[in-house]
Image (spheres, coloured by chain):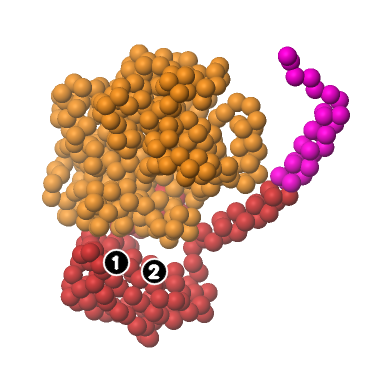
Chain colours: A orange, B red
């Protein structure tokens, strides 16, 4: 089959690899009909995530048709149309019992690697390094889906791929970020980063009752989408105005009740602080550039919540712990427990409360995946979300 | 009134910046070594070196009652070689209905004992030991060739 493979930092190739096989009784094989490039795939592309190996198949947002099931899968049949959640979860451990599916205790065969870096291991993830399982990803014609009796969600035929594909990751991720804010009547929510997760965080904050959402980015086309499609009340271009001053003014001197970091480890900032983090990451003195996170912490109202949806992988510097302690801020985070949100969010889509396809800016062939990564990484052609079709 | 900068201030600022830069470089070198050291620890354990490194107690919690875990352990250990012939195992109920704790002391390395306990937990809780498409760092995360799948299928567990 054809698959998009990682060859090294900013080096990808779509090449022939062996077709996936059933390896465990609870596996299924899915013929992929749509797959997408995630912002967190760029962290792999840019070499920020350790334990990648030349030839690894990328991709953790995908859907398709079941073509084979293992003997332990009783709830799927060949021909079922399914969306696959990006974390792999066994459905039977203590964390799965608590619906903390991205913390599944059994799905990462290489848990020992993650334990070295993070203390304990989270779940395995499709196409996201050997440290997170070494599972082949979904930017391919076929994928093996472990614990297929737990993860894949059957979707109705009346909904197009583009309406349900993002149930695999970014819609639940934005939703969980907003849910973590425990939004109360009158709340103002600020969202750093107007990429796809940021757009869904904005839309979800309104679905959950936010009074106003303020969106922060530097690309006018992304800010425009935040206003026109996701519904942000105000937008801030951080290259044009001081974010903290603007937020202070927009919230009557209180600060936003909740701040969502939808940026993650490759944050960008103008001026000295941006240069500082660039130097530190270049010298391997820190692994991530937490510019949005720092700003979110310092901007949040006292007693407010910081919700971190952006992916961080390692260690950061100049973390304002003093602000967190002395102003009683709460930080919530986590890889998304996608399984928990797929069904309720599918219902919202069916009821017409949201059509997630609004984030798509590019539709390309799987064979064009390297070009897709390049334009997404460089924000060319007003790229926000690429959907690939094998 | 606009702030007036004087030349002496600029000179002092330049010296200070230089000192800061030197400090950053020194810390950078130390930090680089630290991160390289951490990266080395991520390599796969070598079975040869493990046998000479007696481990402390390793433990894992399984979501099952004590009697079921004990019975499963007896079955699991038939023919196992990872823990060696001389190991001690202790079962304790975990607090708050969290299942059963399994504590093992073995002469073998902490890493290999921990992996064995993890596989035991996977088998008991999920019915299988999930396989990666590319185990460890030795091969890419891509689908296996048919002959490898056949070989895997012949492995007893």
Q: CA distance from mark 1 to mark 2?
A: 12 Å
Q: Is residue B152 above or below residue A353?
A: below
> Pointer 1 indicates a residue of which chain?
B
Between A270 and A78, the one nearer to me in the picture: A270
Judging by the rendered image, the residue that carries numbered circle 2 is B114
**Picture residue at 29% right of the left edge, 31% below the top:** A183
> x, y percentage for residue B7?
86, 25
Q: Is residue B22 left or right of residue A46?
A: right
Q: Is residue A380 above or below residue A41?
A: above
**Picture residue at 63% right of the left edge, 27% below the top:** A271
Judging by the rendered image, the residue that carries numbered circle 1 is B61
The magenta-colored residue range is B1-25
Tell me the quarter of the image containing the N terminus of chain A: top left
Between A44 and B91, the one nearer to me in the picture: B91
Q: Is residue A285 above or below residue A114?
A: above
Q: Crowding at label 1, few (<14), some or many (≥20) Cα neighbours within 10 Å?
A: many
Q: Is residue A37 left or right of residue A352?
A: right
Q: Secondary structure at mark 1?
A: strand
Q: Is residue A171 above or below residue A228?
A: below
Are marks 1 and 2 in one subunit?
Answer: yes
Q: Is residue A133 left or right of residue B18?
A: left
Q: Is residue B24 left or right of residue A299?
A: right
**Picture residue at 44% right of the left edge, 81% below the top:** B107
**Picture residue at 52% right of the left edge, 22% below the top:** A245
Q: Is residue A131 visible?
A: yes
> x, y percentage for residue A126?
36, 45
> x, y percentage for residue B112?
42, 71
């Amino acid at each position: 089959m054809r698959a998009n493979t990682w060859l090294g930092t900013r080096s990808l190739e779509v090449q022939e690899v062996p077709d996936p096989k059933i390896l465990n009784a609870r596996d299924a094989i899915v013929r992929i009909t749509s797959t997408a490039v995630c912002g967190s795939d760029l962290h792999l592309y840019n070499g920020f995530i350790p334990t990648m190996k030349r030839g690894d198949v990328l991709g953790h947002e995908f859907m398709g048709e079941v073509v084979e099931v293992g003997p332990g899968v009783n709830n799927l049949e060949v021909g079922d149309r399914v969306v696959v959640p990006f974390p792999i979860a066994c459905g039977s451990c203590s964390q799965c019992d608590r619906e903390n599916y991205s913390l599944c205790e059994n799905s990462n065969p290489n848990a020992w690697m993650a334990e070295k870096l993070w203390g304990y291991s989270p779940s395995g993830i499709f196409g996201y390094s050997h440290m997170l399982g070494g599972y082949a990803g979904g930017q391919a014609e076929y994928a093996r889906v472990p614990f297929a009796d737990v993860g894949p969600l059957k979707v109705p035929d009346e909904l197009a791929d583009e309406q349900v594909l993002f149930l695999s990751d970014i819609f639940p991720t934005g939703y969980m970020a907003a849910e973590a804010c425990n939004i109360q009547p009158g709340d103002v929510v600020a969202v750093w980063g107007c990429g796809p997760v940021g757009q869904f965080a904005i839309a979800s904050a309104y679905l959950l009752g936010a009074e106003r959402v303020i969106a922060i980015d530097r690309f006018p086309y992304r800010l425009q989408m935040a206003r026109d499609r996701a519904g942000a009340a105000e937008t801030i271009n951080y290259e044009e105005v001081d974010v903290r001053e603007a937020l202070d003014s927009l919230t009557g001197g209180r600060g936003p009740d909740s701040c969502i970091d939808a940026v993650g480890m490759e944050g960008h900032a103008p001026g000295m602080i941006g240069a500082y983090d660039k130097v530190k990451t270049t010298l391997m003195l820190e692994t991530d550039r937490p510019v949005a996170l720092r700003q979110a912490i310092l901007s949040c109202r006292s007693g407010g919540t910081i919700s971190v949806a952006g992916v961080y992988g390692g260690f950061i510097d100049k973390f304002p712990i003093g602000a967190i302690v002395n102003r009683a801020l709460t930080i919530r985070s986590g890889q998304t427990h996608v399984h928990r949100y797929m069904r309720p969010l599918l219902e919202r889509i069916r009821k017409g409360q949201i059509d997630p396809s609004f984030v798509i800016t590019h539709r390309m062939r799987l064979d064009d995946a390297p070009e897709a990564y390049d334009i997404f990484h460089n924000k060319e052609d007003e790229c926000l979300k690429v959907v690939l079709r094998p | 009134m606009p702030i007036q900068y004087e030349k002496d201030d600029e000179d002092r600022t330049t010296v200070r910046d230089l000192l800061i830069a030197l400090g950053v470089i020194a810390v950078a070198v130390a930090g680089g070594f630290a991160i390289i050291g951490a990266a080395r620890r991520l390599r796969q354990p070598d079975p040869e070196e493990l046998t000479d490194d007696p481990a402390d107690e390793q433990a894992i919690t399984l979501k099952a009652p004590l009697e079921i875990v004990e019975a499963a352990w007896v079955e699991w250990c038939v023919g196992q070689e990872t823990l060696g012939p001389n190991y001690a195992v202790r079962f304790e109920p975990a607090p708050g209905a969290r299942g059963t704790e399994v504590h093992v002391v073995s002469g073998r390395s902490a890493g290999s004992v921990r992996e064995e306990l993890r596989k035991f937990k996977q088998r008991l809780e999920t019915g299988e030991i999930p396989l990666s498409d590319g185990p460890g760092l030795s091969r890419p995360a891509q689908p296996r060739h048919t002959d490898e799948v056949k070989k895997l299928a012949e492995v007893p567990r």
